[in-house]
Image: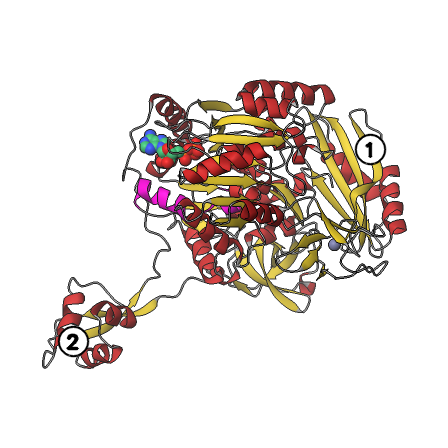
Amino acid sequence: MIEDSPFVAAAPVLVPMPAERPYTYAVPPGMRVVPGSIVRVPLGPRQVAGIVWDGAVEAVDAKKLRPIEEVFDCPPIDKAMRRFVDWIAQYTLSAPGMVARMLLRAPEAFDPEPWIEGLQRTLAEPDRLTDARRRVLETAEGGLAWTRSGLAHAAGVSSTVIDGLRAQGVFETVMIPPRPVVAAPDPSHAVPELMPDQKAAAQKLRAAVAADAFNVTLLDGVTGSGKTEVYFEAVAAALDKGRQVLILLPEIALTHAFLERFQDRFGAKPAEWHSDLPPRMRERVWRQVAEGGVRVVAGARSALFLPFKELGLIVVDEEHDPAYKQEDRVFYNARDMAVVRGHIGGFPVVLASATPSVESRVNAGQGRYHRAVLSSRFAEAALPDLKSIDMRRSPPARGGFLSPVLLEQMQRTLEKKEQSLLFLNRRGYAPLTLCRVCGHRFGCPVCSAWLVEHRFRGQLVCHHCGHNERRPEACPECGTLDHLVACGPGVERIAEEVVAHFPDARTIVLSSDLLGGVRRLRLELEAVANGEADIVIGTQLVAKGHNFPGMTLVGVVDADLGLANGDPRAAERTFQLLSQVTGRAGRTGKKSLGLLQTYQPDHPVMRAIVSGDSEAFYEREIAERGRAALPPFGRLAGIIVSAATRGEAEGHARGLRRAAPQASDLFVLGPAEAPLSLIGGRHRFRLLIQGERRADMQGFIRTMLANGPKLRGSVRVQVDIDPQSFL
Ligand code: ADP
Ligand code: ZN
């Protein structure tokens, strides 16, 4: 709000730093700002970009105020987005400035994109016509403006030919507006023929969009049932209404294949938004989203903070995916925040998944969300036949990890020239290395974690802090040579076993250790989809939304792995991950098989997957959550206290606990030393707050923080509302 005091105009400005409220700046005479204006302001010795915020400014001596330096020539952040920032800050107990910071991550975009110099044909004719000149004139026919190099390239001539023509007045200089990052999508470009159940689901989504109001629909359909095809109909409906659309995907599912698929349907690609986007492209996307030129963004979770001009639909694909949770600075779940954004903006949200989160299932069951179900795979594609392998009965050979049953199926798959996928959610070669003589185990010097051997790189690596060291020849404890043993498997070790069994097969390992980052991984995934590998060994990165047409066997090396930790969502996560992994098989109609290696074939998760009775699994899981008053029936929050010494961390955590207010509907558990009690040299303690659904969790924690010990020395406190991780 801009206060016109008799002395000086002032405005509250939210700056990208951990401040609890906006700072007040003077508005110099003649400068015009409105709430949402992006401005440059001095902050200490620096200049930063901030956002003019709502609310009255505090009464301050105007002479003491520093002035706003500049108002960027940029559309203001709209009211819905400003409320969204305030809402997230309040909900996650973060400083509003730190949330605003996520909006301001493309600084160059605050200035308009420059127009570029171009050339346009005049009526003048050249003095003489060479071959090269003729090609240029033919290319430039039609009166469009060209850049100098663009025209030279298109006509296949050198730029000097163009310069010559310009000198003769055959071309004149004009200014060309910035090019759109993507062409406009056309909702009626290639409307698919939908199957009856797809049609019914698409109808629901179209109705949700037509309602022009906030509502949430859970699009629940087995892998390969055509969820993407169906939610594209909602996208088309929103585009028809002149609204912008955001499609959220887990980062790694944002593949070329997805963009192409969108293009097939709409005749143009969506704009992409993810961590791998080159900075210049980021800025252009940000700007064109703000100006409304970009109509559809397909992005990772941070795309929620793009300044849409007229957002009218958010689709969250793979809504159950833990990758939507950010656990850094501002701890938020992008799936939940997408729903909040829809609520504030008054538009529909679609959550799509083959294995919805228990939270979303309960919301749908209780009528808060609509539900659209697709229960069979599209066309002739059948779901894979799923079986568990009881590892107690069919154990692997000594020193191996693959049961003979699985190896035999791999052999058959190879003979049929089809692809196999072995899934193990563990990077590296072995999760633990020890000395056979003295029993020494290699641990991280600054974390409470064992070092993971990466044999390919010849290193022992900490997966929490990145610490790495060379794998020595001798034990550092007893000095014995060549007696170190690797315990347990990682993907590299499985690859070794596979190569020993199938030396002629083309084997590839896919994990986040692949050099070249996300981009390289996307390329490799495409290569696999194109049939350029026979056996793929991968971590959960291969599980996400990829379409491998030749994949007919999926083997889960250790189906029990995710069940071992004390996380209340362990069963749900395992169920989701294993369903998703096995769902990679048989997407093109060939007969396919999914095999789960397990020591607990009777565990409810294994039984649910093998029987295909996911309804029974959800029923049971929902009932158990209800009994234990766990989310979504109750509320949880974590507080993580870390410090350079154990004593400081523990002392501070105890102080916070003592500061907890009296409440009948919330209670504090802990502090307890965190399962990962040391990360990067910082000692960690956790408090867990649990309570009823309607309890005022935020107020409770705020009181704890306000009345608890002051932050001193190395102590850091992180609040994690609706935690996903309990480590
Ligand atoms: P999901 O997202 O549920 O896993 P997809 O949307 O990826 O399923 O669909 C699986 C495959 O079936 C894709 O190759 C898709 O193009 C195809 N498909 C689904 N529905 C149709 C349809 N109505 N017409 C043509 N192809 C379809
Ligand atoms: Zn470490």
The magenta segment? 249-267
Q: Which mark is residue 22?
A: none
At 42% from the left and 39% from the top, the residue drawn is 415
Quarter the C terminus occupies? top right
Tell me if residue 348 is in the magenta stretch. no
Which corner quadrant of the figure contains ligand 2? bottom right
Residue that numbered label 2 is attached to: 132
Give the image location of residue 611, x and y in percent. Answer: 54, 20
Give the image location of residue 552, x and y in percent. Answer: 44, 35
Would residue 535 appear left or right of 479 to someone viewing this image? left
Residue at mark 2 to residue at mark 1: CA–CA distance = 80 Å
Q: Amino acid at mark 2?
A: Ala
Would residue 314 appear left or right of 606 to someone viewing this image? left
Relative depth, front residue between 537 and 574: 537
| Between discs 2 and 1, the one toward the N terminus | 2
**Label pair 2/1, CB-CB below 8 angstroms:** no
